[in-house]
Amino acid sequence: MLFSLGAGGSVFGGADCRHLQACLSVQIVAVVGLLSCANDVCGLASHLPLSPPSPPRRAAAAPSSSGSGLADAEAAVLSKMLSWPAAQLFPALDLARLLVLNRPAAEQLAAAAGPLAADAPHGGLGAALAAACAGEPPVPAAQQTAVRAACNCFVQPPLLSWVQSVGGRVLDAFAPCAASPNKNVRQGLATLLVNYAVMLSKLASLELEFKSRVGAGLQGIE
């Protein structure tokens, strides 16, 4: 059972996580609205009309199963925000933390995530997560929102594949969080490690099942 982190740092799993996603539907609509407003303020692609926020869905309709994701102008604003210095990154990562729970937005973020390295081209989720953890001196707000966003990346398949492929770099990037004096940062890191442990356990189970089926198939041939 994989876990995601709520706004207050509490841990959710299984049915609780699905309920959290449903309750976040209105918040995700609000996030898109914020990006639209930021687009007007920053003057980015102001000549392009932004898609209006969709009406709030009923709680039973999880935001992960529908929706059109971010418009090009909104995605451009988020990319610009993810390029901010570590000390100012936490608002952008807090928006990303919610958006990764939405399937279409997760697909967009995964496609543009890039490598998880502080020296990677800025604007992607990977560079932002790495930069948030590499700040000197450490910025607890950035570390906290970064680790929460990383935990939520295990919810949707596109970003789950990404965190699996860059697992080693994720652990290296977030290693400094273990020594953080901030309890919420350490709790977030613990949840991230639990998510990786659950993921590896599932992969091991699938591998064992596959080997068993191969062995049974070979015996059938004999």
Image: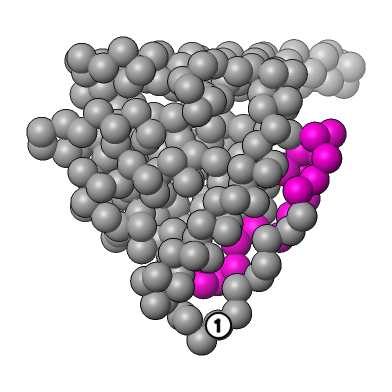
**Residue 144 on the magenta span:** no
Q: What secondary structure is the magenta-colored segment mainly?
A: loop
Q: Quadrant of the N terminus?
A: top right
Pick the residue in front: 203 or 82. Answer: 82
Pick the residue in front: 39 or 216. Answer: 39
* Left/right of residue 53 with respect to residue 90 in the rendered view: right
Q: Residue furthest bottom?
A: 47
Q: Residue at x 64, y 51 (%)?
A: 29
Q: Is residue 40 above or below residue 194?
A: below
Q: Is residue 11 above or below residue 18?
A: above
Q: Is residue 191 visible?
A: yes
Task: Please give the range of residues in magenta.
Answer: 56-74
Pick the residue in front: 204 or 146. Answer: 146
Q: Residue at x 38, y 34 (%)?
A: 145
Q: Residues within 10 Å of mark 1 (few under 14, many from 20)?
A: few
Q: Residue at x 84, y 34 (%)?
A: 60
In the rendering, at what x and y percent does residue 15 appear?
74, 18
Q: Residue furthest right?
A: 220
Q: Quadrant of the C terminus?
A: top right
Q: Residue at x 41, y 76 (%)?
A: 44
**Residue 71 on the magenta span:** yes
In the rendering, at what x and y percent does residue 135 appear?
17, 38
Q: Please name the amino acid that badge 1 sits on.
A: Leu
In the rendering, at what x and y percent does residue 149 appear?
46, 35
Residue assigned mark 1: 48
- Residue 62 position by quadrant: top right
Determine whether the residue tagged by mark 1 lies in a helix, strand or loop: loop
